[in-house]
Image: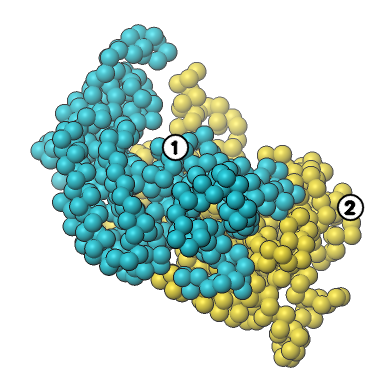
Chain colours: A cyan, B yellow
Amino acid sequence: MAQALRHGTMRAGNLAVVLGELDRRGPLTRAALADATGLTKTTVSKLVADLIEAGLAVESGTVRDGERGRPGTAVRLSGHRVAALGLEINVDYLAACVVDLTREIRVIRTQPVDNRSAPPADVIAHLRALATAVLGEATTLGLTIPGAVVALPGPVDPSTGTVHRAPNLGWRDVAVTDTLALPLPVVVDNEANLAALGELWFGSGPALGDFLHVSGEIGIGAGLVVNGELFRGAHGFAGELGHVVVIPDGPPCRCGGSGCLERYAGQDALLSDGETLPDLLTRLRSGDPGALDSCTQAGTALGIALTTAVNLLDPDTIVLGGIYAPLFPWISTPATRTLRSRLSQMHPRVPTLVISAAGTNAAPLGAAGSVIQRIIADPITHLPTTQEAIG
Amino acid sequence: MAQALRHGTMRAGNLAVVLGELDRRGPLTRAALADATGLTKTTVSKLVADLIEAGLAVESGTVRDGERGRPGTAVRLSGHRVAALGLEINVDYLAACVVDLTREIRVIRTQPVDNRSAPPADVIAHLRALATAVLGEATTLGLTIPGAVVALPGPVDPSTGTVHRAPNLGWRDVAVTDTLALPLPVVVDNEANLAALGELWFGSGPALGDFLHVSGEIGIGAGLVVNGELFRGAHGFAGELGHVVVIPDGPPCRCGGSGCLERYAGQDALLSDGETLPDLLTRLRSGDPGALDSCTQAGTALGIALTTAVNLLDPDTIVLGGIYAPLFPWISTPATRTLRSRLSQMHPRVPTLVISAAGTNAAPLGAAGSVIQRIIADPITHLPTTQEAIG
């Protein structure tokens, strides 16, 4: 019995190793997979057959077989069958996307909606309708969706599916997963964490080195990616950049503190009453002094908080996402000036500010991507169970 | 040749696995080591013989052999032959210690000295004299020292042995390793990083969970330990808590910024002109209002910087070390009050402040401990070379 279990565990591990190689390195022959993994060609052939049967891999043309130069039939990840659902609830929009196993974006939908004025149950019902529509589109495309992740603007407890506190939504201890009640496993995670992963997988990626991704929204979150992995902290609450203290005796913040970055550089601080982001961009492009001044003040405050973040976290690069992406030309200059004046004497290289390549969809894409990541790390749960029993 | 290399590499890896088990789990029989590592008893016996021959392990009495209950001869780490040298240059003292493979402290020496008024070469010559004396004591104890680490109060480049900038010493690009010229390999590292590791290995250790260790000195550094490992950032400069911005338009700091934590809570801010730490402690114990006020102000500023650190890093525990250890009763209360008032609404559990158990010797102990860590991770470099050639 223990022996059988060990055999099953070994097969699960080997399936993950093979699928991981295809994910990292692209199309490979069975011989190259055997070389790369140290498994025998017979074992690799059996594992590849299982992955193809499950729709996770597919044969794909002919490639040269590494150093030896012999051409062979390549195997690669399949985007045809298995995909993932990424969802986001934010203060003024909902989003849903479907990403296949090759990380190609197959469906993406965003709905502007003011979620501050609606009860949590209504917001979640609205997301359920959006998710159901998107799942329908995925089915039409022949895709199977084994799981979803929901991005939320606040610290969450992924183990219970609950958002502890989302002050900008006015939410407290909302059981998102249970209320959403989708017909597939759903996990919740923090929006800023998922946006950082979205940038890693769908944006500029590994070229950024270790990076801090800043999500400027009504709240301001950040996600730190170190060696290709998200740094979450002891309880998953790391990266709350919006509540870094900029002026200790500044105005009170919805978090219970005062003088937090969010009060100086969040969307509500940047926009005048009743103004939308496109309105502000129009004013900025026309050189409106009030709009320019507002961005200079926000960028300077952001620079102070980022100085602190660099002192504590020491990233290679800082990525500005969310509303800071369209505002980049006006926000990044004062932020960079502040960073340089405060850091250049102690730091041989002050981190560069770059614009997010994943853009405003970073969080839902990171959400779907994290489901894909789980499938690739543990493919056996997506194989027919009869095969698993046989070992 | 490739085969021989692979065999040598495998032996090196297996030696590390066996030594690592003895380090983590304490005395074990050869049978228990075989069970734990998956190696055959014959292989384990050969590896253990090599480790004993090299003075890294020793036979030690009889223990029960795990579940089976048969008594057997135990093997454990040996503290008799191999040890490590830990050194520290700080602004107002030098320190040296010797720690053996079992992490027992065998020698520890501290010398108060004002290093601000001396040229770097003189300070380093002074450390060389201290290190040489301590190495002599180690030889008397029968210990061999294969390496040393020097703790320095500033960002360092371990690859070149250079401290980039130590503003409180007035140092810039000082080649510490080359100037020290000890007859053994020497690596440099940041004092706050090493103090955090000192607390992990010689203080309260794993019971702290993921912790931020704060080294209050003339400068203020911090080291974050996550899953038993130090978080260093992309260039090894993470944890510069002293330069977290507390008041953006505050007084200029030696780092080139302004309003940094160091200006409000560093040793120079806490002590009156000409006052020593014992003087301040005497005043505090007698209830001197000026001294109490000074600690309240410093503790409040520390609380603001720690609020920011918790928002970004999310540790379980915050350890106050360096001068904050003796000042704990007066510093921790205002710091905790500030943390709670700013964090309790968003964070289900605000991190606890605890006093450093490793105390003022945390950095040199962490320095020696990191040499021990390297020996345990790669014991083959400490075995006679003839054996290595035989494979």
Percent across and percent down for residue B153 are 73, 56
Quadrant of the rendered structure where residue A250 is?
Answer: bottom right
> Position of A243 compared to B180: left or right?
left
Q: Which residue is mark 2?
A: B119
Identify residue type, mark 2: Pro
Question: Are callouts 1 and 2 both on one chain?
Answer: no
Q: Is residue A309 left or right of residue B176?
A: left
Q: Residue A36: x and y, percent? A: 37, 25
- Looking at the image, the residue that sits furthest to the left is A386
Determine if residue B326 is in view: no
The residue sitting at the top extreme is A70
Q: Are marks 1 and 2 in contact (CB under 8 Å)?
A: no
Label at residue A203: 1
> Is B261 rendered above or below residue B169?
below
Q: Residue at x 35, y 43 (%)?
A: A365
The picture quadrant where one finds residue A157 is bottom left
- Tell me the element at label 1: loop
Nearest to the observer: residue B92 or residue B203? B92
Can residue A74 be seen in this snapshot?
A: yes
Please tell me which residue is depicted at 68% across the width and 78% down the height of the picture: B297
Residue A334 bears which disc, if any? none
